Structures are given as structure tokens and as C-alpha cells.
Amino acid sequence: MSVDWAKASEEQEAEELASKVLNLGLSKDASKPPPSVPFTSVPPPSSAPPSFLSSPPPPLNCAPPSAGSPLPPKLPTGATLQSSEEDSAPSAAEVSLMRKVLCKGIVESKNDVEVLRKDPNSPLYSVKTFEALQLRPELLQGIYDMGFKLPSKIQETTLPTLLANPPQNLIAQSQSGTGKTAAFSLGLLSRIDPSKRCTQALCLSPTYELALQTAQTVMALGKHCTDVTIKCAVKGETLTRGSKITDHIVIGTPGKVLDWLTKARALSLADCCVFVLDEADVMIATQGHQDQSVRIHKQLPRTCQMMLFSATYDGTVMQFAEAIVPNPVIMRLKREEETLTNIRQMYVECPTAEDKYTAISNIYTIPVGQSMFFCRTKQTANWLHARMVKDGHHVALLTGELSAEERLSVLTSYREGRERVLICTNVLARGIDVEQVTLVVNYDLPELNGAADCETYLHRIGRTGRFGKTGNAINIIDGPRSMELLQQIQKHFNIEIKKLDYKNFDEIDKLAED
Ligand SMILES: Nc1ncnc2c1ncn2[C@@H]1O[C@H](COP(=O)(O)OP(=O)(O)OP(=O)(O)O)[C@@H](O)[C@H]1O
């Protein structure tokens, strides 16, 4: 069963939006035209995220697993999962959002940005400091308040182009968390003339949640630009008949922006001088968004600076990008290869279900910072979570049964360190890599089409090699089938995975030494 999280979340959005929107400092009163929002009304960024992201994990909306049961739900390893057991695979937008919420800081890269195409008239150079960009002092202050000291790789190279005069079109690709949002946010903010009461910048994001994340970054960086206003064009935001949007920056989803442009005729792009298409790869993967973006794009003045950002840049994205952004400078930052070199990989043999739980409980005691435990089915994840909570352990649970809102809440709480362990399903966590996690436990090994899923194994426990730190990965082996999967993994990577005695605390304690 595949659930479109973005779509499902939209259904609840209408009811919940008023309170969330209020948290962003935007209007919730539908009877009045939406007021302009000065940046000063926005809470400080990283330290105090909006309360809809920072509330404690809500109760689960799934049937409560029987925590009293000492044994996990029975499912023979290797059996084909029924749709009721399988967790729903996340959409590209979900994965992107989960990554964003989990990401604590910039993803550094050793790779240099490749500039694929240059406009010979554009003075392209890179900057090593934010001060060299000659930004408005208010923007510099916003950067300092965010705690940014130096530009990231992608910022170093894209910012001079984003800020160049005459404006230059740009296509930029780099993996999630490398600082793209902050780069274009500075680009948007620096082009606004606050004395003009009209929309001068438009940013399209694939989903409601991603649009709000971007709005937060723009607001945080523009915190001291008190004369600049922003409006979110997302589901649930209503306009009174005949009202006109005069906010300088509009950030929203293609559907809502198109609605305001064509049906409500509340938004005009006649004075828009910057257009950002964010998460282009996710946009393409989301049904209907590509066409809507093209229709919006047609309403932009020819002189408008166009920018497109994407975490990937395959054929479809490239085609779309070049159709939307004429004569661009193209900049790419290659993703670094993940390696298993710095990872201590082990397995523990647990002949019975009770042994498996004992192993997990002992592993939980390893003081290694944060861990993630991966289970095969949502039933197992629910059961393990319930039993560990019952035993007084601080563990969080992430499965496809949670609503979009609940997932954000769980991830934020975990990122902030309120829980030591995140228990999740293999499917749900397939696209998420969490750099700060120092121990990964495969309660069930990742499997795809009846064989070991080596790619997911690497992605889950691999590091890019830029952190010299050692990581730990423990695989729980509960029978011949999981031993076979382990052997496939060893063979695939040509590695030896060592046996660990989970009852030997001295051996377990050693894991925390690096
Ligand atoms: N120059 C910087 N110095 C330190 N931290 C930074 C810098 N730029 C951005 N960050 C932080 O790094 C994290 C990732 O940045 P950002 O969201 O801009 O990345 P991104 O490439 O847009 O990611 P995504 O593709 O997921 O949207 C954020 O927490 C952000 O606050």
C-alpha cells in the first residue's frame, strides 16, 4: 500500500492550518485581507522552531501494540510481506522533509562545485566570506544570528551569481543539507526594494510543509529587514474577495500560487524580479506540479531572474530545468561516495525472540550518542517501541502510520536529543541518512526482492568519509535466513562482519570507546 503523505496531509491541513500559520506570524483571520508580516514577528530559527514542529510527540494513531506481549509479532524472515504489514513507502517530498527536519547543520563536502556553463559577461567568482558579498548590513546580521560563520561550498560559488548585476539565471544542484535554501533566501532578500508595495520575489516549493520550512529560513535570515514582508501561499490560506497581495516575497506551492494568480486574481507577478523553483526533483516527482510550475512561469516578466535548485540532476530534472531557466549558469556539487571504512560492523546471534530483545536492551545501554533501530514491519517497530517504553527506555517511533505532523514532531524531538533511539521501519527510512547517528542496529536486515538490499545497507550505515569518527553497526541475526542475508552483504562489500557477544558487557562497552 502506498500512501501519498503530501496528499494525505492536505486533508488535515484545512483544520490545522490556522494554528500553524499563526505560529509563523501569518494571518489566520480569513475575514480580513492577510496582513503583511514584518520579519521581526518570527521566532529565532534553529533555537526555537515554530511550535508546530517542536511539540512533544503526539500519541500514535495506530492501534496500540500489546506492550505486555514479550514476543514480537510473528513473521517468518523471507516471507513476502502483506500490504497490512508493509510500511508505506515515503514520497520524494516526504523524504526531503524528513531529511530537512533531521539535519542539524550543514553537510560539508570535500568536492568542489563544478561550474558547467558560464555566461561570459557575468563576473563569476567565488567568495570565502559572507562579508565579501556586500550584503545589506541587516542581512549580514541575520546570517550571524543564524550562527553561520562561513559560506558553505555551494553558497561560496552560487552567491556571487545570485547577487550579480545584471541578474544572472542559475541552476544549482547539490545534495540535501548543503545550504541551497539559505543561498537563495539571501538572493531573494537582497533583491527586494521595500519601498515598493508589490510582490517582487516568488518561490515555489513542492509541498505545504516544504514551503513552510523555506519560509522559516527566509524569515530567519531576513529577521532584521523589518520593512520586508512575506506571504505563504499554501493550502488553507484564504483571501477575501477582491483583496490584492502586496507582500514582497511569496513562498508557496504551485497549486495555491496558480489559484491566487488565475482564479482569485489576487497575486500579480508583473513586478517579480526573482523566481526560485526549489526542490525541482521533488517537484517533478509530485503529480501535476511540473505543469502548474510551467503555467506560473509563463506569467513572469522576461527580465525576472530565474533560479532552480535541486538535490539531484538527472535527465528529467535537466530537461525541466533548462525549459524553465533560460541561459543559465549551471553549478553542481557532486555527492561524496559513502564508504564502510570507518564503520565497525558486527552481528549478534539471537536464537530466540527473547534473546533478540535482550540483545536490543543491552545494546541500548551503550553510551554512543544517538542510535537508529531498523525493523522490517511496522508491527515489529510498534511492538519493539512499546516494549522498550514499558521497560523505561527513551525511544521514539517513526512509522508510516503517523500523520505528517506526527512524523515531524517525532523527528524534531529526536533531533533535539529527547530520545536516544529512533525505531523505524526499513521502508520508511530508506532515503534518510543521518550523519549524527553513531550506532545503527538492523533489528531486521534490509531486504529487497528476496535478497539482501546492499544499497540500503550502505546508505544506512555508510559515512561519506569526511568524518574521521568511527561508527557502529550491529546486525541482529535470528535464524538461517538472516544469516544468509548477512553473508550476501559481506560478499557484496568484500568485508568481514564480526560476531559480538551481546551478553558480554565488556565487549559491548568497548563500542563506546571511540
Ligand atoms: N553557511 C552556513 N554555515 C552553517 N550552517 C549553515 C550554513 N548554511 C546553511 N546552514 C545550515 O545547514 C542546514 C542545511 O541548510 P539548507 O537547508 O540551506 O540546505 P539545503 O541544501 O537547502 O537542503 P535541502 O536540499 O534539504 O533543502 C540548515 O540547518 C542551515 O541552517
Image (cartoon, grey):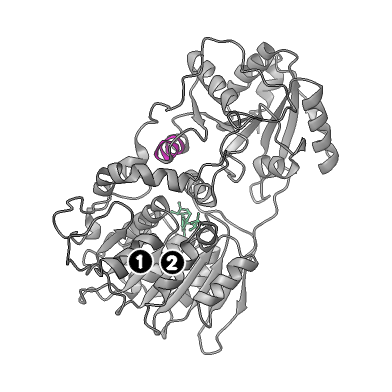
> Which residue has dot 1 on it?
258
- Choose top left, top right, bottom left or bottom right for residue 448: top right
Q: Is residue 238 visible?
A: yes
User: In the picture shown, does residue 95 fall above or below 85?
Assistant: below
Q: Nearer the viewer, residue 80 or 396?
A: 80
- The part of the chain drawn in magenta is 405-412
Could you say which disc has been placed on residue 292 in the image?
2
Q: What's the CA distance linking mark 2 and mark 1?
A: 7 Å
Q: Does the magenta stretch mainly form a helix, a strand or a loop?
A: helix
303 sits to left or right of 72: left
Query: Where the C terminus falls, by quadrant?
Result: top right
- Crowdedness of circle 1 by 10 Å Cα count: few (<14), some, many (20+)? many
Q: Is residue 140 visible?
A: no
Q: Where is residue 277 in the image (x, y as percent from the top left)?
A: 45, 67
Query: Residue at image x 20%, y 76%?
Result: 195
Query: Residue at image x 49%, y 18%?
Result: 389
Q: Confirm whether the magenta stretch covers residue 229.
A: no
Query: Residue at image x 77%, y 26%?
Result: 482
